[in-house]
Image (cartoon, rainbow, N blue to C red):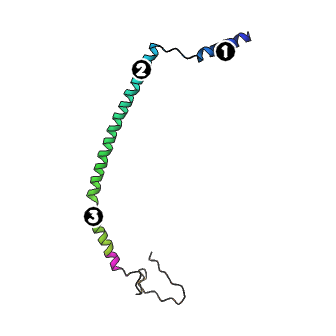
């Protein structure tokens, strides 16, 4: 009895592993599957194009908003230059006033230079 079960299993495996013969029905099935895939991909492409156009419009609106609220670079730059010109230069030999204490630092007697950081 055991031997007959083994023979049946082996014979089923062999039959299942044999490829099916090409038939007209198989050709129609393949053609239908390809048609459905094509329709699906075309629909997906249409959705992507729609989304792409929406994103482009949104970017255009954001660019317009940015232009409305943008400060001209010249005015910003001139303000910064005015602020810098009011402060004493770093390379001048004049003593600097400490902004925190409003005093001129005493000259150091050591061979090291004292650096004051204005935090």
* Residue position marked by numbered label 3 in the rendering: 72
Which quarter of the image is occupied by the C terminus? bottom left
Between disc 1 and disc 3, whose residue precedes? Answer: 1
* Residue position marked by numbered label 2 in the rendering: 31
Asked whether 83 falls inside the magenta stretch, the response is yes
Please identify the residue farthest to the right as the structure is shown. 2
User: Is 107 located above or below residue 54 in the figure?
Assistant: below
Q: Quadrant of residue 3?
A: top right
Please state if 25 lies on the left or on the right of 3 as rendered. Answer: left
Asked if the residues shown at circle 1 and circle 2 are in contact, with their CB atoms under 8 angstroms apart, the answer is: no
- Give the label on residue 93, or none: none
Q: Position of residue 35 (x, y in %)?
A: 39, 23
Q: Quadrant of residue 18?
A: top right
- Give the label on residue 10, or none: 1
For the residues marked 1 and 3, what is the alpha-carbon distance in whole angstroms? 84 Å
For the residues marked 1 and 2, what is the alpha-carbon distance in whole angstroms? 34 Å
Q: Residue at x 39, y 31 (%)?
A: 41
Q: Position of residue 11 (x, y in %)?
A: 65, 13
For the residues marked 2 and 3, what is the alpha-carbon distance in whole angstroms? 62 Å
Q: Position of residue 109 (x, y in %)?
A: 53, 90
């Amino acid at each position: 009895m055991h031997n007959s079960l083994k023979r049946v299993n082996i014979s089923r495996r062999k039959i299942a592993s044999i490829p099916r013969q090409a038939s007209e029905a198989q050709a129609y099935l393949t053609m239908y599957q390809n048609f459905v895939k094509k329709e699906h991909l075309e629909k997906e492409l249409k959705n992507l194009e729609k989304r792409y156009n929406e994103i482009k419009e949104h970017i255009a609106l954001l660019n317009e908003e940015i232009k409305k609220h943008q400060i001209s670079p010249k005015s910003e730059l001139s303000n910064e230059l005015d602020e810098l010109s009011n402060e004493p230069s770093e390379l001048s030999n004049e003593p600097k006033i400490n902004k925190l204490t409003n005093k001129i630092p005493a000259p150091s007697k050591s061979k090291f230079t004292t650096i004051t950081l204005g935090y």
